[in-house]
Image: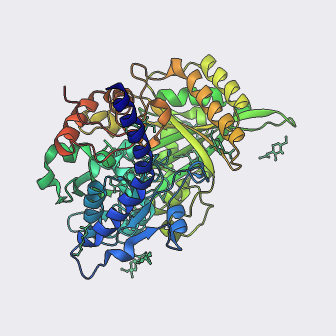
Amino acid sequence: MKASYYSFSVVSILLLSTLISLAASDQLGDFLQCLPNSTHSPSWPISQAIYTANNASFDSTLRSYINNRRFLTSSTPKPLAIVAALHESHVQATVRCAKSSGLQMRIRSGGHDYEGLSYVSSVPFVILDMFNLRSIEIDMSTETAWVQAGATLGEIYYNIANTSNVHAFPAGVCPTVGAGGHFSGGGYGTLMRKYGLSVDNIVDAQIVDVSGNILDRKAMGEDLFWAIRGGGGASFGVILSWKINLVRVPETVTVFRVPRTLEQGATHIVYRWQQVATKLDSNLFMRAMPQVVNGSVEGQKTIEIAFYALFLGRSDALLDMINKSFPELGLKPEDCKEMRWIESTVFWADFPNGTPIEVLLNRPQGAQIFYKNKSDFVKDVIPKEALKRIWKLMIKAEPIWMQWNAYGGRMSEISGTATPFPHRDGYLFKIQYNIGWDEGGNETTVRNINLIRKVHDAMTPYVTRDPREAFLNYRDLDIGSNPSNETNFEKAVIYGSKYFKHNFLRLVDVKTKFDPQNFFRNEQSIPPRPHH
Ligand SMILES: Cc1cc2nc3c(=O)[nH]c(=O)nc-3n(C[C@H](O)[C@H](O)[C@H](O)COP(=O)(O)OP(=O)(O)OC[C@H]3O[C@@H](n4cnc5c(N)ncnc54)[C@H](O)[C@@H]3O)c2cc1C
Ligand SMILES: *[C@@H]1O[C@H](CO)[C@@H](O)[C@H](O)[C@H]1NC(C)=O
Ligand SMILES: *[C@@H]1O[C@H](CO)[C@@H](O)[C@H](O)[C@H]1NC(C)=O
Ligand SMILES: *[C@@H]1O[C@H](CO)[C@@H](O)[C@H](O)[C@H]1NC(C)=O
Ligand SMILES: *[C@@H]1O[C@H](CO)[C@@H](O)[C@H](O)[C@H]1NC(C)=O
Ligand SMILES: *[C@@H]1O[C@H](CO)[C@@H](O)[C@H](O)[C@H]1NC(C)=O
Ligand SMILES: *[C@@H]1O[C@H](CO)[C@@H](O)[C@H](O)[C@H]1NC(C)=O
Ligand SMILES: *[C@@H]1O[C@H](CO)[C@@H](O)[C@H](O)[C@H]1NC(C)=O
Ligand SMILES: *[C@@H]1O[C@H](CO)[C@@H](O)[C@H](O)[C@H]1NC(C)=O
């Protein structure tokens, strides 16, 4: 008994290791054979969408939609194949064939995931790339548009403005972010206090489910439609397109950028900003950006806080409002610039004054820097003494910088259960911590990641707790994760409750109903309910 058991296990170990090394290439072979068999659209041959390591442009295709250089190193696992869908049928085939060949599939639209989850996995995998599917169809008679997942925010903004001077869409400030990931993760930007998040203005969607079927809102039902508006699309299916409600903006809006150093009273100003920014007219969005800069004395560092604003109105009304409610800022008429809303998106994206709006049509340029970002939510005013401690820490942890985004307005009116995004009423602001670098050795990487973790740790007393909340679009594997190849429910509860609070269990129910086998997964996906 013992002897045969022993020989059985030796044989099976040998067999297993051979099988594992062969498995990936067999799976790829199956996948590549399956694809043409699963598409029946003669005018869209799928061969033109498939890239494997044998194709000369495999590398450039993979790279052009990687935003973070941290995941563009020689040790980053590479996909066995990329399908850059040219037609909806290619998306359906990729889902069916990845599933039948047992390969993991990662879905990529704009490639801006902070942790690279749309294009990296530690098990054999393929990428379903959506960048070719990027049509934008605007219907002004209903003030709506259908936008495909591969469209960028810049393209959406540009096309809206090319059709109307008084319409806009509430979404993020970075023009190269993709609609596929951004909207399914919530999507916030400068119109948040007036109109809420992107997901608050989405009225329909098309999704490819785990069986490869295309479902619209009516066919998928309200539960799944709820889940993909903030719960992350990648746990539930492939978003093909969104139907968005355009919102109204005035022909002229006003922006400002006012920097103040500690020596100019920045601590007091941002202390007051915490008290007023959420209560002001919802036509005004104000962001405070603390960062380390050189002080007036050679070799000495200080903190500068840049106050950025978008006001949906003219500068005289803005000056009046700030003078009355936030005089500490000392806003002057010459700080304010009037422009069209579309020009304000170029300003917010940090392009130099006067950059033509066509810059919004630039596609992602590949990864420029290495970075790590983290998030927090603040409900209580941070006292001045604490602010001073934070500045000291930031100066030690340079080049850390932060973005503080004021809440209130429309965000306080929408229920925390209306969408999976739970951080609504009762919040003062959202923090984003940022650190970027452009030299990729491990030492620098380890040092910088430790710095941002340290600052995040030090902020513990001032931010939400039980759970310490985080924003899905600011993906952060530090808050809990699973390995690429398994989804442990208990681990998922940890990150799930930080991103979604009480909405996590409803997301689990939707997942259990629509993808019980957990085909659509990544390190922070929603798990199906475990069976007992
Ligand atoms: C420079 C920069 C600025 C940013 N500014 C903002 C901002 O102002 N506001 C804000 O809210 N966020 C912002 N973000 C975060 C951004 O919204 C998220 O990273 C978002 O997920 C990116 O979407 P993507 O399609 O570009 O990314 P991807 O990396 O392609 O996808 C992100 C996630 O969504 C999944 N996914 C992508 N497409 C689909 C699809 N079609 N169907 C199903 N799942 C899909 C991916 O699998 C992955 O899990 C910014 C990010 C960067 C890098
Ligand atoms: C694909 O179709 C061809 C011919 O129709 C068939 O020979 C082949 O076995 C099929 N492959 C798979 C993986 O289904
Ligand atoms: C990749 O190479 C294969 C085999 O030569 C070819 O059939 C396919 O069309 C190529 N893919 C693209 C996108 O050109
Ligand atoms: C803007 O609109 C004009 C006129 O309708 C059209 O010719 C042009 O192609 C549009 N530009 C873009 C980038 O869509
Ligand atoms: C800050 O000061 C250092 C020297 O102390 C200098 O090298 C650097 O260029 C300065 N940065 C800016 C933005 O002026
Ligand atoms: C603010 O208002 C006061 C009186 O209401 C006025 O005296 C002052 O000049 C205003 N300041 C600015 C910067 O507009
Ligand atoms: C995340 O941090 C990097 C590095 O500082 C920065 O370039 C990027 O813009 C940050 N993301 C956002 C949304 O600000
Ligand atoms: C960084 O460390 C990882 C593992 O810790 C290693 O695989 C990789 O080669 C290292 N990269 C560099 C640039 O040293
Ligand atoms: C996942 O991978 C790890 C390490 O490669 C392995 O130990 C584990 O058994 C795998 N889990 C599953 C469910 O395959």
Q: Nearer the viewer, residue 334 or 477?
A: 477
Q: Residue extending furthest bottom?
A: 43
Q: Residue at x 35, y 51 (%)?
A: 183
Q: Is residue 281 visible?
A: no
Is 366 on the left-hand or right-hand side of 499?
right
Quarter holding residue 499: top left
Return the residue nearer the eye: 378 or 105: 105
Q: Residue at x 69, y 50 (%)?
A: 438
- Return the residue nearer the eye: 1 or 261: 1
Q: Quadrant of residue 470?
A: top left
Q: Residue 465, relative to residue 424: is it above or below?
A: above
- Relative to 532, is 230 on the left or the right? right
Query: Where residue 131 sits: x, y (%)?
Result: 41, 65
Q: Is residue 331 above or below residue 377?
A: below
Position of residue 200 measured from the top left corner of the image (x, y, whole percent): 28, 46
Q: How is the image coloured?
A: rainbow
* Place of residue 358 in the rendered image (x, y in percent of width and height, measured from the top left): 51, 71
Q: Residue furthest right?
A: 298
Q: Is residue 478 visible?
A: yes
- Quarter of the image for the C terminus: give it: top left
In the image, 289 versus 229, the foreground residue is: 229
Label tally: 0
Give the quadrant of the N terminus.
top left
Residue 451 position by quadrant:
top right
Q: Quadrant of ligand 3?
A: bottom left
Figure check: 311 above or below 56:
above
Give residue 197's position: percent from left, percent from top.
34, 45
Q: Is residue 113 left or right of residue 205?
A: right
